[in-house]
Amino acid sequence: MLRLDSVAMYKLEILHNKTRLLLAPLKGTATVTVLVLVKVGSRYEPAQLNGISHFIEHLLFKGTKKRPTSLDITKELDGVGADFNAFTGKDHTGYYIKTNQENLELALDVVSDMLFSSVFSETEIKKEVGVIIEEINMYEDNPVMMVDHVFDEAVFQGSSLANYIAGPKKNIRSITRHDILNFFEANYSNDNVIVAIGGSFQETETIRLVNKYFKKREPHFDKSQYLPYQSSQESPRVKLITKATEQVHLALGYPAYNITDPRYYPLTLLAIILGGNMSSRLFLEIREKLGLAYYIHSAVSVYEDTGSLAIYAGLEKSNIHLAIKTIIKELEQLVSRKAGPEEIKRAKEFIKGKLILKLEDGAQLVQWLATQLLLKNKVETLGEQIKKIERVTAAEIQQAASDVIRHSRLNLGMIGPYDDTNKILNILH
């Protein structure tokens, strides 16, 4: 079993070039993960450039001065059986390579080459437009994946948090190489980057290698910024995407706490009790008792300045009215009555167990630590987080419910064969 104190072992270095280096050794593994996080994503983008962070993520795999083609990059990593990929979110972008411990230098060489020497070929940019548009088409054809964005458009209306991570297709077709270079130079500066290494490695040699491969880059432009989220919502909102589906997909919820708010822990426990697993209230009521949904679950999302609580469900279209009424009833019960001690205990043990399982993997561990550092500017260890979870009381969970679950701040994102928003609003009322 993973010891809690072993996950507390991490070290933070500030390199000569201002890059933050996070080292997270993990015993009992023969692999090492190199993760680079950049503090930029879709919420940092102006409307006309929405999608550019994700575009850049794609382009960094398309050729460097040392490795001119995508194949030159991938064949080196494939040649050692490495796992590698990248991802873009609303507030950060990440690149990772997981490989055998003896290939650490190769991983650092490749990922630093992508960050410092990508050529952004006009030919590759034009080709990648089609790739990204097909990726957008894939998401739009998959309501389970798309409904999260539809909900964000409702709950974060008027904020760049409502931006679609991949961007609208018209932007992808119109973004120029000049736009890409300017945005890249502004946001991929050393002080906006964290290099995180987790798993099996030798500390002194690793620091030497990172200093060798991660050179200094002076920013040529000011970093992108975003306006903090402010809600003026006074009544329920619906964002509806009309689509001829047999199943209706919905996300229903509320704006909530930011990533550093201590009330995040009571809210997380509330989400587990509500719909976090197969013994949760919503799963038992909506799926097992009433048979209204194939999937139903709840989740908390957090950002630097805000967050959200959401319930996701896939329903047969004739069940939509009863399902929404039942979900709202379960939400209101969390406000009116404290959760019971056994229910709270199960939720705490569930979170603890899931965290321990996740953090036994070096790649998951280093991403968990580095994301905290990037967005909170500090790291809470597994032991510290579990202590905070264990201290949460029934009264604090009920207070979080009272704070967040307010009818005037209810939001519904939905994809299905409906075209009348007012009818859906009437269900909410």
Image (cartoon, helix red, strand yellow):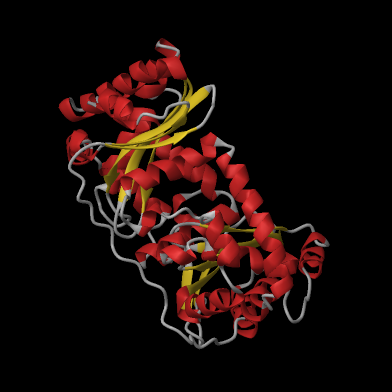
Is residue 198 among the parts visible in the rendering?
A: no
Q: Position of residue 207 (x, y in %)?
A: 59, 79
Q: Is residue 193 above or below residue 362?
A: below
On screen, residue 136 above or below 349:
below
Which quadrant is the N terminus positioned in? top right
User: Relative to 362, is 397 on the left or the right?
Assistant: left
- Residue 362: percent from left, percent from top: 59, 55
Q: Quadrant of the C terminus?
A: top left
Answer with the quarter of the image where residue 39 lies: bottom left
Label total for image: 0
Where in the figure is residue 265, as x and y percent of width and height? 30, 45
Q: Nearer the viewer, residue 73 or 129?
A: 129
Image point 37% across, 55% down: which residue?
Answer: 161
Q: Is residue 420 above or below residue 76?
A: above
Residue 113 shows in the view: yes
Q: Position of residue 9 (x, y in %)?
A: 48, 62
Displayed quadrant of residue 178: bottom right
Q: Nearer the viewer, residue 51 or 204?
A: 51
Which of 25 and 119 lies nearest the eye of the viewer? 119
Camera-side residue of 164 and 8: 164
Q: Quadrant of residue 281?
A: top left
Q: Residue at x 51, y 75 (%)?
A: 183
| Residue at 26% from the left image edge and 25% from the top image edge | 426
Give the residue at x 63% y 53%: 133
Is residue 136 depicted above or below 400 in this figure?
below
